[in-house]
Image (spheres, helix red, strand yellow):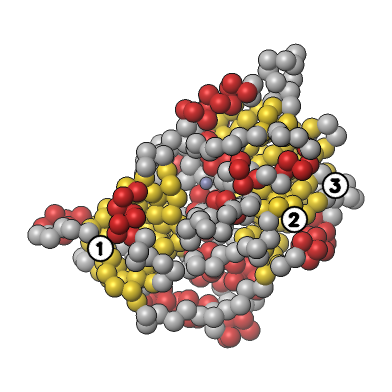
Amino acid sequence: MDQLNLFPNMNTEVFSKLTSAELLEKNKYLLTFDLTNELLIKKDKVLYSEEFVECINEMDFKDYVFAYFLKLEISVETYLASFKPIHDEGTYHCTLIPLDEYKQMVHKDDCYKATVYYVEGSIKQKVYYIKWSNKCESIRESHVELPLVSSKKEMSTLLNGVLEEVNIKAFHVLDVGQGSSNIINYENGEGEEKYLFYDIGISLHSTRDPDYSRYMGLYESISFDIFNTLIISHWHEDHFLGIFLDQSGELFKKTWVVTECSGTWNAKRLCYINSLCGNLMMIDNGLTGLLYENTNLSIYKGEQPKKKSIGYRNGSGLYLYFKKGSDNLLALGDVPYDYAQSLLTKSNSRSLKVDTLIVPNHGSILQGNFIEPRLSMKTAGFDISNAVISAGVTSSQHPNYETLSELFAKGFNTLRTDVECKVFNEKDITIEF
Ligand SMILES: [Zn+2]
């Protein structure tokens, strides 16, 4: 890893590409840039070469399962003034400036403090100042075509062959810190025990979160071979970074149901390897609403307006609705309530009543919540509806105070992974069916 010069000790130029711009509370943007350098570009060239396709079984593809990126928080004003005009879908030169070199610099304008990450089996990070310069025209990306699922009919045909019946037994919301990871345990039509992942994230705050070793320990204890399907709600690191921790390579042999990864280097690597070793179902971004229905499970995709900025991924994510007998559960990923309106056709009313709501976007402020508890604490005897929040140490408010008070006012009993799992020393919050 050292010879790749990922965390240089002197000013070093790398290449960057904006992959996500999320508006946080407090009028801040969280920007994510995928990074690469000359040596990683060479690595990618091997991955995307024809020789690699021919030798995939003999070659250790795990050498190519890595993510290199940076995250920074900036004010909305700076973002609009300095970043938006220059950071389109292109690749830009940028310089990583170590802190001690930054201190000695005379002209410190246009330098931004950011955390650089490298993930390959474990998560490594270092703080740098970053200075962006001109657009880079010389990097020619490998043109691999990843097949897209472009109709709901195609999606049904493909998924029916994989999932058969999904007779859900339990939905586990794992405690992974600031991130989202859920395991669904179900029986298929033949009564066989099956598992699927809905997101497989882990917190990036490995230095700030005192519980970090717990999350790592959790992933180390999971045998990935028992899973048949991996559904990734959207390509944000806090929802997919766990894939890079799978040392066995088992996850790559599974069926993946994912949204488009265009515009990223890190997610594209994963999807490409899955397309060779497993079964990739990448859903065309043009498809929205109800995509798939099974006995107990419906899969939806968010209805994000087209005018949203390139880096905005939350709204077009995949979300799940389970119904078994009289029980139901809704897991929204990071899809805001407004973008999940298709659910209302199911309920034929202005609100949807749920027993368990997996609260979207870790409990950040989201407008237009039409979700109501089906069994309110106020009206029902012992039965209550739960709202589960996947939360952890972060710089923004996840969960936000307003979200918590809204859920409480509606009559939800709120369960948070960062509180519940710590108090009872559990690895997850389990909803049984
Ligand atoms: Zn998230």
In the rendering, at what x and y percent does residue 47 appear? 53, 77
272, above or below 432, in the image: below
Q: Residue furthest right?
A: 190
Res 146 quadrant in image: bottom right
In the rendering, at what x and y percent does residue 21 appear? 43, 54
Q: Nearer the viewer, mark 2 or mark 3?
A: 2
Q: Residue at x 76, y 48 (%)?
A: 298
Q: Identify the element where label 3 is drawn.
A: loop
In the rendering, at what x and y percent does residue 92 appear? 34, 70
12 vs 224, left or right, is left
Q: CA distance from mark 2 to mark 3?
A: 14 Å
Q: Residues within 10 Å of mark 1 (few under 14, many from 20)?
A: some
Q: Are marks 2 and 3 in contact (CB under 8 Å)?
A: no
Q: Which label was assigned to residue 252?
A: none
Q: Are marks 2 and 1 in contact (CB under 8 Å)?
A: no
Q: Earlier in the sequence, mark 1 or mark 3?
A: 1
Q: Identify the element where label 1 is drawn.
A: strand
Q: Nearer the viewer, residue 352 or 43?
A: 352
Residue where numbered disc 1 is placed:
131
Q: CA distance from mark 2 to mark 1?
A: 43 Å
The quarter of the image holding the N terminus is: bottom left
Residue where numbered disc 2 is placed:
291
138 vs 250, left or right, is left
Amino acid carrying mark 3 in the image: Thr
In the rendering, at what x and y percent does residue 366 appear? 53, 38
Residue where numbered disc 3 is placed:
295
Q: Residue at x 31, y 71 (%)?
A: 93
Q: Nearer the viewer, mark 2 or mark 1?
A: 2
Amino acid carrying mark 1 in the image: Lys
Amino acid carrying mark 2 in the image: Leu
* Residue 413 in view: no
60, above or below 397, in the image: below
